[in-house]
């Protein structure tokens, strides 16, 4: 059977973080309950074709999925299993914010089939967490982490952010070391990006000054300078490696065999279906996303209605063969193992060098790509300037 990944979006959070530009917002209990009902109805709207696929992974993201009750999450999972053919060994991840999970929730999640948790820790220093606008403390994270282990979760990811305002090289090392010593199976380590429309962009991204993207505005602490940012990047690789984590993608590190299968599917261009407000999909070489209008979404999938599965879709784009080949390159090269020429030929019936020989030689000559036994991958230097490399294939 054809393989399929599922993404379910839960757009709610207790409070928006200062750096976040995701589709998320606070909501009261009534809106959350109405949304859960609409999401289940959207899932049901796919029952006409869903069982043509074998679902290999499910990712429940947000927002903060852990703001839902155990019953709400259990109802979503029950509906999902009724409609889709979910493999017995499927990886099923739910994102959680520390302090928003309880033993009851975690036990309910485990009973519903969720087998992987992704905690948004970001930093082990409370001062830095407050700077980011996070609602939890490090102590609350450790309590949530222990509770997840007690509930039987043996596959946990921890998200971390470097180069945040006021952070030092030493405090970042402390965050990395503390997270690694907890023994989580997976660590995602991202560098802060100043996204337009966020409070952080207003503070740091608009005016000149010290720091890599802005400066000290209105008394706020500065962003780390370029040298410190670079040291943090290098320390991430070396320190996590010393704790047994291997880097398998630009920002992701895992213990052996614990790579995030869902994310690997994105980088390998597997088909995926997004369910929920604003969720994106790739089906039969067509990209689209659901409406981001909450009122429209709730009305489309209200109780008692029978909408078609495509009613909420917007931004529909049929990918050309050129689009598909370019995506194969810049998504596949995100993985440290890179891409295989045989896979390119198998998908497109064309030799890799016949299509991209000029670009490959140019990047190899600049020390950004390396080639061995039919596999092409980024060098260490190429990884550092990966966006430049990817643009060569667009």
Image (cartoon, helix red, strand yellow):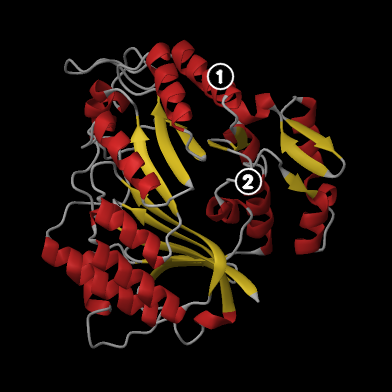
Residue 3 spot, x, y in % from top left = 61, 69
The residue that appears at 42% across and 52% down in the rendered structure is 152
Position of residue 343 relative to residue 200, above or below, is: below
**Mark 2 closeness class: few <14, some 14–19, many ≥20 residues within 10 Å:** few
Residue 73 as seen in the image, left or right of residue 169 = left
Residue 76 spot, x, y in % from top left = 33, 70
The residue that appears at 66% across and 29% down in the rendered structure is 382
Residue 149 as seen in the image, left or right of residue 35 = right
Q: Which residue is mark 1?
A: 234
Position of residue 135 relative to residue 114, above or below, is: above
**Toward which corner of the image does residue 80 lie, by quadrant?**
bottom left
**Toward which corner of the image does residue 303 lie, by quadrant?**
bottom left
Q: Secondary structure at mark 2?
A: loop
Q: If the image is split into quadrants, where does the N terminus sit?
A: bottom right
**Toward which corner of the image does residue 201 lie, by quadrant?**
top left
Please tell me whether mark 1 or mark 2 is closer to you in this view.
Answer: 2
Position of residue 335 relative to residue 221, above or below, is: below
The residue that appears at 55% across and 26% down in the rendered structure is 240
**Visible residue check, residue 296:** no
User: What's the CA distance linking mark 1 and mark 2?
Assistant: 24 Å
**Mark before the other along the chain sequence, 1 or 2:** 1
* Residue in the foreground of this view, choosing between 273 and 258: 258
Q: How many marks?
A: 2
Q: Secondary structure at mark 1?
A: helix
Which label is found at residue 289? Answer: none
**Mark 1 closeness class: few <14, some 14–19, many ≥20 residues within 10 Å:** few
Residues marked 1 and 2 touching at CB (< 8 Å)? no
Position of residue 268 relative to residue 90, above or below, is: above
Q: Which residue is mark 2?
A: 257
The residue that appears at 83% across and 54% down in the rendered structure is 342
**Visible residue check, residue 138:** yes
Residue 361 spot, x, y in % from top left = 81, 34
């Amino acid at each position: 059977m054809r393989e399929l990944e599922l993404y379910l979006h839960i757009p709610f959070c207790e409070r928006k973080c200062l750096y976040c530009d995701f589709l998320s917002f606070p909501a009261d209990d009534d809106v959350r309950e109405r949304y859960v009902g609409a999401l289940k109805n959207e899932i049901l709207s796919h029952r006409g074709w869903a069982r043509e696929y074998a679902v290999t992974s499910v990712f429940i993201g947000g927002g903060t999925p852990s703001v839902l009750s155990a019953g709400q999450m259990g109802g979503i999972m029950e509906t999902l299993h009724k409609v889709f053919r979910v493999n017995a060994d499927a990886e099923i991840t739910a994102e959680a914010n520390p302090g928003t999970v309880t033993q009851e929730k975690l036990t309910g999640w485990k009973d519903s089939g969720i087998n992987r948790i992704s905690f948004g820790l970001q930093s082990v220093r409370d001062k830095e967490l407050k700077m980011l606008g996070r609602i939890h403390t490090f102590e609350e994270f450790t309590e949530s982490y222990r509770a997840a282990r007690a509930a039987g979760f043996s596959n946990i990811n921890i998200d971390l952010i470097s180069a945040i305002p006021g952070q030092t090289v030493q405090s970042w090392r402390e965050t990395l070391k503390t997270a690694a010593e907890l023994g989580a199976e997976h660590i995602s380590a991202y560098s802060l990006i100043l996204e337009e429309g966020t409070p952080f962009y207003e503070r740091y991204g608009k005016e000149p000054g010290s720091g890599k993207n802005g400066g000290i505005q209105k008394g706020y602490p500065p962003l780390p300078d370029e040298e410190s940012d670079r040291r943090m990047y290098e320390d991430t690789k070396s320190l996590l490696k010393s704790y047994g984590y291997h880097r398998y993608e630009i920002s992701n590190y895992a213990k052996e065999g614990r790579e995030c299968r869902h994310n690997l599917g994105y980088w390998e261009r597997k088909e995926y279906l997004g369910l929920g407000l604003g969720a994106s999909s790739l089906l039969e070489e067509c990209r689209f996303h659901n409406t981001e209008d909450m009122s429209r979404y709730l009305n489309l999938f209200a109780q008692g209605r029978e909408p078609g599965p495509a009613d909420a879709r917007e931004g529909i784009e049929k990918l050309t063969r050129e689009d598909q080949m370019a995506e194969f390159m810049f998504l596949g090269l995100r993985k440290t193992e890179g891409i295989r020429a045989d896979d390119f030929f198998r998908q497109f019936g064309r030799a890799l060098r016949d299509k991209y020989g000029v670009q490959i030689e140019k990047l190899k000559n600049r020390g950004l790509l390396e080639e061995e036994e039919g596999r092409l991958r980024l060098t260490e230097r190429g990884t550092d300037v990966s966006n430049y490399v990817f643009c060569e294939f667009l």
